[in-house]
């Protein structure tokens, strides 16, 4: 094993590198992975994470009814409000400070729209995760989160250690999604350890070293940037002048 593999890697992907699609009027999507008509065989997934889309829906715009199956779908709203309605009778409005989970299981159709009466766009991050339980009954969950002590909040998890917590339950036993917040110029809290971690910056900025110690180069993240982390990479992260908010996946499997 090479020294680089032992030390891990922090693979920074800039927001501008995302594939841009406009599937319908008023909808703009920026994709982190291969998606629909955009196929890159070297960029299909990171661990069990299949998609991390930055979505913007203009006033009155939205995704018409479409179907999902055997996918864990997590949604975090950055600005505005997103209205969800599905074929299993679930309906909800997702606003900043709330996390939504749709476990598509054996199959569910749904719509996603900028909430009626909005006077501006809704911006949100939507992430798709491969489950390890298939053809199950679809499940829906919506939770308003209370920020955890120290800036680290568990949003959703399928791990046994997190049973009994307020986190939404995933059908994936080796994955968890965290919200990380830090004030201006403050270090990020200690992040959960895992062989694979995926960090997406929603607001603010972050400076960090690529690996621990003097050999780690200094890098920075801006909104929309993401990092695919293996091992002990992504060292000494510190928020910038306006603080930082990140979504971080803790992943214990390569697939």
Image (cartoon, rainbow, N blue to C red):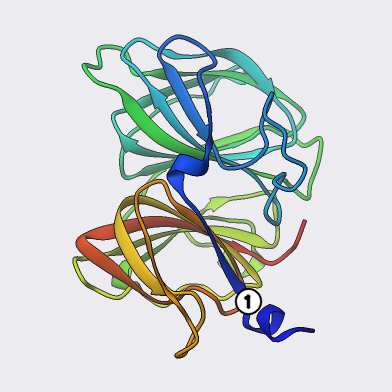
In this view, the residue farthest toward the bottom is 214
Q: Residue at x 72, y 44 (%)?
A: 44
- 10 Å neighbourhood of mark 1: few (<14), some, or many (≥20)? many
Instruction: Tell whether 35 sits left or right of 22.
Output: right
Q: Is residue 142 above or below residue 197?
A: above
Which residue is drawn at the image coordinates 57% and 80% (left, top)?
Answer: 232
39 is higher (above) or lower (below) than 162: above
The residue lying toward the viewer, choosing from 55 and 95, is: 55
Q: Nearer the viewer, residue 216 or 98?
A: 216
Residue 37 percent across, percent down from the top left: 69, 24
Question: Is the N terminus in the top left, top right, bottom left or bottom right quadrant?
Answer: bottom right
Q: Is residue 163 visible?
A: no
Residue 211 in picture, x, y percent from top left = 51, 80
Q: Is residue 242 above or below residue 29?
A: below
The residue located at (59%, 12%) in the rendering is: 65
- Horizontal side of 241 relative to 222 (left or right) equals left
Determine which residue is flagged by label 1.
8
Q: Position of residue 105 (x, y in %)?
A: 73, 34
Q: Quadrant of the C terminus?
A: bottom right
* Residue at x 50% of width, y 18% of height: 22
Asked which quadrant contains residue 87, the reply is: top right
Callout 1: helix, strand or loop? loop
Would residue 118 appear left or right of 144 to someone viewing this image? left
Q: Nearer the viewer, residue 15 or 57?
A: 15
* Most foreground residue, 195 or 169: 195
In this view of the protein, can residue 138 be seen by the observer? yes
What count of labels does the image hold?
1
Residue 11 drawn at (x, y percent): 57, 62
């Amino acid at each position: 094993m090479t020294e680089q593999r032992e030390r891990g890697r922090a693979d920074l992907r800039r927001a501008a590198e995302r594939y841009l699609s406009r599937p319908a009027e008023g909808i703009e999507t920026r994709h982190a992975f291969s998606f629909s008509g955009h196929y890159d065989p070297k960029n299909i997934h990171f661990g069990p994470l299949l998609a991390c889309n930055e979505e913007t829906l203009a006033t009155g715009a939205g995704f018409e009814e479409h179907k999902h199956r055997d996918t864990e779908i997590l949604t975090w709203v950055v600005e505005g409000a997103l209205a969800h309605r599905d074929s299993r009778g679930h309906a909800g409005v997702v606003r900043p400070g709330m996390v939504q989970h749709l476990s598509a299981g054996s199959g569910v159709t749904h719509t996603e729209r900028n909430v009626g009466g909005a006077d501006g766009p809704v911006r949100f991050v939507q992430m798709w995760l491969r489950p390890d339980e298939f053809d199950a009954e679809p499940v829906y969950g919506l939770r308003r989160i209370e920020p955890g002590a120290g800036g680290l909040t568990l949003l959703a998890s399928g791990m046994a250690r997190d049973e009994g917590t307020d986190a939404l339950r995933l059908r994936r036993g080796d994955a968890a999604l965290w919200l990380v917040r830090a004030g201006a110029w403050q270090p990020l809290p200690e992040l959960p350890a895992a062989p694979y971690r995926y960090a997406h910056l929603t607001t603010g900025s972050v400076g960090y070293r690529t690996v621990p110690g003097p050999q780690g180069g200094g890098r920075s993240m801006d909104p929309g940037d993401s990092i695919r982390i293996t091992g002990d990479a992504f060292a000494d992260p510190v928020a910038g002048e306006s603080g930082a908010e990140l979504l971080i996946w803790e992943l214990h499997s390569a697939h």
